[in-house]
Amino acid sequence: MGSSDRLFNRQRTVHEIFGGGFVADVVLWRQKNFTVGVLLVALASWVVFERSGYTLLSLVSSVLFLLVVILFLWAKSAAILNRPAPPLPELHLSEETVNEIAAFVRTRLNDFLSVSQDIALGKDTNLFLKVAGYLLLISIVGGLADFLTLGYTSLFIMLTIPALYEKHEDCIDDYVKMVCEKTQQLYATFDVECIGRIRKWILEKQKLS
């Protein structure tokens, strides 16, 4: 399939859109064992949270508390019994790593602020409609499900829809293009018959006044 035949005339494949690396392989089920493992772990976590009544914060706090207590007692007993201390890796962030993280965060924040400014100043109507639509959709979906269920559902969609799309890309692209063409035809008809009449009526009213 040529780039002109793809949805939105995109130049890149689905694998390239997701980065073309290990993450793309996982999302598109090219690392099947790892993808299935992620889904099973996510499902198990969801069941644990739903059945136990734990929240994410309380569970993380409990796990960290247990880990700290174990390491502390291990270190103390090792010092008393002349045994080796717990084999912990060096907990240190290099200046280079911090600079890379800061540069990445700064770039993303600047992009976000630039987009927000364009929307606030009314420079990009299409972008405003897209953002408003996404926020409205998130608000509706968020009202129907809790954060944990929403997160698991989002992960499930992320690990299924792209893979299904890549597998049936030709059929889906043809169908979406057909729907878009029909929608454009309907909009053109609506614009001519309804909006055109309204404009004509407004102009006639202005002439009479």
Image (tube, grey):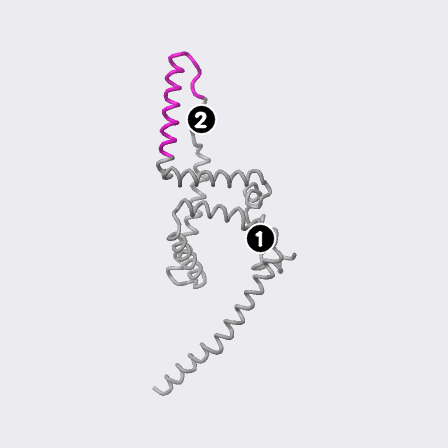
Question: Which residues lie in the magenta part?
Answer: 60-86
| Quadrant of res 125 | bottom left
Mark 1 surroundings: few (<14), some (14-19) or many (≥20) residues within 10 A: some
For the residue marked with disc 2, what is the amino acid?
Glu
Q: Secondary structure at mark 1?
A: helix
| Quadrant of res 33 | top right
Residue drawn at 58 percent across, 63 percent down: 177
| Secondary structure that dominates the magenta span | helix
**Number of the label disc, if any, that sits on residue 58:** none
Q: Nearer the viewer, residue 98 or 22?
A: 22
- Image coords of residue 126 (percent x, y): 45, 63
Position of residue 103 in the picture relative to residue 9 (left or right):
left
Residue behind mark 2: 90
- Image coords of residue 178 (percent x, y): 58, 65
Quarter holding the C terminus is bottom left
Residue behind mark 1: 165
As drawn, the residue found furthest toward the bottom would be 208
Position of residue 25 in the picture relative to residue 100 (left or right):
right
Choose mark 2 or mark 1, whichever is in front. 1
Magenta stretch holds residue 63? yes
Q: Secondary structure at mark 2?
A: loop
- Image coords of residue 62 (percent x, y): 36, 32
Residue drawn at 37 percent across, 84 percent down: 205
Magenta stretch holds residue 206? no
Mark 2 surroundings: few (<14), some (14-19) or many (≥20) residues within 10 A: few
